């Protein structure tokens, strides 16, 4: 079965001086979701942007806002990101003491809930919360920066997760974040990924539409 992968360009690689234009441009270019990386300089060694940017961009796109929270503690901010306009809220198990409770909160706010696995975080971290998860995201770089080299070893984790999701019978997206390019995408899709985040490979390209199609494999 071939499914059309979801492509989620990461705003982290956009031109921050013209974010509204950039968001409109990727929507026009055929992006499916807008991936937004929120970093606090504490959970990850970088600071990106926060609530005001999510809120400011909300009226500028109809794309689902796929908000990736790299902040700790994450719990005090979940409600605020939902209110700011996030459609999906993805969190790392390491960013709070009670993953199950945090996911329940995201769902209670009417948002899709995601769990993000760092390269060293095992598949087992999500096995007991599958009933509360809409998205599982595998980091194929260490979180914190765009433009890093893809970690090949994570492909095996992707195929393990594909099996776990299929066995669960649940409707869960298997998303990849980090180093996604037209070169790494085919292997990821073959391993069972269905949703690809791409920062540099989209916003670093001259033609966003062509870049998205190249990653999707329809160029
Ligand atoms: C890294 C972020 C990624 C990043 C990906 O912490 O979570 O979403 O923007 O950037 P590329 O696609 O350039 O690896
Ligand atoms: Zn991300």
Image (tube, rainbow, N blue to C red):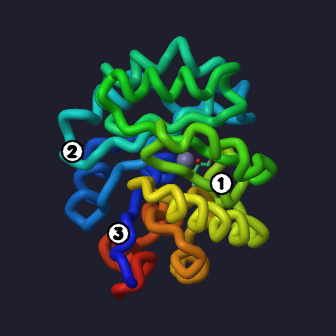
Q: Residue at x 50, y 47 (%)?
A: 12
Some atom of ligand 1 lies within 8 Å of the CB belonging to the residue at label 3: no
Q: Assess whether mark 1 and mark 3 are in contact (beta carbons under 8 angstroms).
A: no
Which label's residue is closer to the chain start, 1 or 2? 2
Q: Nearer the viewer, residue 75 or 47?
A: 75
Placement of 130 over or under 210, stated as above or below: above
Q: Which residue is mark 2?
A: 61
Q: Calculate the distance from the C-alpha at mark 1 to the C-alpha at mark 2.
A: 26 Å
Q: Calculate the distance from the C-alpha at mark 3 to the C-alpha at mark 1.
A: 23 Å
Residue 199 shows in this picture: no
Q: Residue furthest bottom?
A: 219
Which label's residue is closer to the chain start, 3 or 1? 1
Q: Position of residue 143 (x, y in %)?
A: 68, 46
Q: Residue at x 37, y 38 (%)?
A: 112
Q: Residue at x 61, y 27 (%)?
A: 99
Which label's residue is closer to the chain start, 2 or 3? 2
Q: Residue at x 49, y 17 (%)?
A: 77
Some atom of ligand 1 lies within 8 Å of the CB belonging to the residue at label 1: yes
Number of numbered discs visible in the structure rendering: 3
Q: Which image quadrant for residue 192?
A: bottom right
Q: Indicate left or right for 56 with 107 as reference.
A: left
Q: Indicate left or right for 182 with 3 as reference.
A: right
Q: Assess whether mark 2 and mark 1 are in contact (beta carbons under 8 angstroms).
A: no
Helix, strand or loop status at disc 3:
helix
Q: Position of residue 135 (x, y in %)?
A: 47, 48
Q: Which mark is residue 139?
A: 1
Q: Which mark is residue 208?
A: 3
């Amino acid at each position: 079965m071939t499914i059309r992968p979801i492509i989620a360009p990461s705003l982290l690689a956009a031109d921050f001086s013209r974010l509204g234009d950039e968001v409109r441009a990727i929507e026009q270019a055929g992006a499916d979701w807008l991936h937004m990386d929120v970093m606090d300089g504490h959970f990850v060694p970088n600071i990106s942007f926060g609530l005001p940017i999510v809120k400011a961009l909300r009226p500028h796109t109809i794309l689902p806002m796929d908000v990736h929270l790299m902040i700790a503690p994450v719990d005090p901010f979940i409600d605020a990101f939902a209110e700011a306009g996030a459609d999906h809220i993805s969190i790392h198990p390491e960013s709070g003491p009670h993953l199950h409770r945090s996911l329940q909160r995201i769902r209670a706010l009417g948002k899709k809930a995601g769990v993000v696995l760092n390269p060293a975080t095992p598949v087992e971290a999500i096995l007991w919360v599958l009933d509360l998860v809409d998205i599982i995201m595998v980091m194929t770089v260490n979180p914190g920066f765009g433009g890093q080299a893809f970690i090949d070893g994570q492909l095996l984790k992707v195929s393990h997760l594909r099996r776990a999701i299929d066995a669960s019978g649940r409707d869960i997206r298997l998303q990849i974040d980090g180093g996604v390019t037209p070169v790494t995408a085919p292997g990821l899709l073959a391993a069972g990924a269905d949703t690809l985040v791409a920062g540099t490979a989209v916003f670093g390209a001259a033609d966003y539409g062509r870049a998205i199609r190249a990653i999707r494999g329809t160029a």
